[in-house]
Image (tube, rainbow, N blue to C red):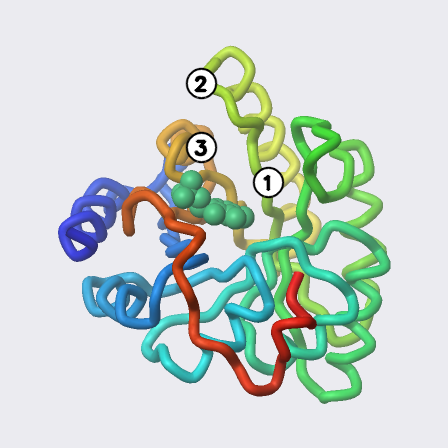
């Protein structure tokens, strides 16, 4: 089932996005066991993304053969658990968070790849910079040490209304393109989940984060292995 889902999706995105660019498929692995994740990697998944630091750390040593991304809401006091272990942080949605990533990366003598999260739908429930502040944020974060800004991440509103979603996806693509003209390191537009990824890649997303479409429905009651470094009381 996992294997077949991965193969089908990889086949479907083989031709690239609406602009003919290669699409990176990130498996969103929250609540999934290391066994399930390893099956997805064996089937061809090249990158996995966790939402919670505790789950990231718990599974870190148990999976192999794929990039590790962080895609969820990140608290500044947990940045320390990711530095040096995470290939790409998608969800940098405030200057305070960017500054903490910078501070710890410089101290560890590493460069952390990040995406700037944009709240493109202007939703109160979502994190990220307002769309209007995206270019200012990009300039300010790019000036920080220890950080490499590789692009943008956005989550579209939960809706099936194409007339609402399509212009938002297009707005993100325009933002991505204008930033890429100014900075050659800008490479990724991370946009698209199980419900809306086809629309997103059509409009020019080149990185999609899929959970349900790969693994099936989530069961939040499922236990994940605990990491000894982080106590459960340190959880989100
Ligand atoms: C869970 C999650 C996804 C994947 O969601 P699905 O609808 O299961 O594909 C993508 N991005 C983020 C940030 C997530 O938290």
Can residue 206 be seen by looking at this rendering?
no
Give me the disc on residue 180. Answer: none
Residue 84 coordinates in the image, percent (x, y): 61, 82
Image location (x, y in percent) of residue 14: 24, 46
- Other residues around mark 3 within 10 Å, as few (<14) / some (14–19) / many (≥20): many
Using the rendered image of the protein, determine whether residue 76 is visible from the camera's viewpoint: yes
The relative height of residue 164 versus residue 113 in the rendered view (above or below) is above
Label 3 SS? helix
Disc on the earlier residue, 2 or 1:
1
Furthest-top residue in this view: 163
| Label 1 vs 3, first from the N-terminus | 1
The x, y position of residue 36, in whole percent, is 27, 64
Q: Disc 1 marks which residue?
A: 154
Q: Give the percent coordinates (x, y) of residue 225.
A: 43, 75
Q: Residue at x 53, y 51 (%)?
A: 188
Cα gap from disc 2 to disc 1, whole angstroms = 16 Å
190 vs 122, nearest the viewer: 122
Which residue is at 36% across, 77% downward?
63
- Name the residue: 70% across, 55% down: 92
Mark 1 crowdedness (10 Å alpha carbons): few <14, some 14-19, many ≥20: many
SS at mark 1? strand
Front residue (pair 206, 93): 93
Report which residue position mark 2 lands on. 160
Q: Quadrant of the C terminus?
A: bottom right
Q: Is residue 139 above or below residue 86?
A: above
Please give the residue where the numbered disc 3 appears in the rendered image. 200
């Amino acid at each position: 089932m996992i294997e077949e889902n991965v193969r089908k999706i990889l086949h479907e995105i083989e031709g690239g996005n609406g602009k003919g660019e290669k699409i990176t498929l990130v498996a969103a692995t929250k609540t999934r066991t290391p066994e399930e994740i390893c099956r997805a990697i064996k089937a061809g998944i090249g990158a996995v993304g966790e939402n919670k630091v505790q789950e990231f750390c718990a599974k870190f040593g148990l999976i192999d053969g794929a990039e590790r991304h962080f895609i969820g809401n990140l608290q500044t006091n947990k940045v320390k658990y990711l530095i040096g272990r995470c290939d790409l942080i998608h969800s940098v949605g405030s200057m305070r968070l960017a500054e903490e990533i910078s501070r710890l990366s410089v101290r560890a003598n590493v460069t952390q790849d990040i995406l700037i999260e944009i709240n493109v739908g202007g939703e109160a429930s979502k994190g990220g910079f307002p769309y209007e502040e995206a270019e200012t944020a990009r300039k300010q974060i790019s000036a920080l040490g220890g950080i490499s800004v590789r692009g943008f991440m956005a989550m579209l509103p939960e809706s099936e209304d194409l007339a609402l979603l399509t212009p938002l996806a297009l707005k993100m693509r325009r933002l991505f393109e204008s930033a890429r003209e100014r900075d050659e390191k800008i490479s990724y537009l991370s946009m698209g989940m199980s419900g809306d990824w086809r629309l997103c890649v059509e409009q020019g997303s080149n990185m999609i984060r899929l959970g349900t479409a790969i693994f099936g429905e989530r069961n939040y009651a499922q236990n994940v292995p605990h990491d000894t470094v982080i106590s459960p009381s340190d959880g989100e």
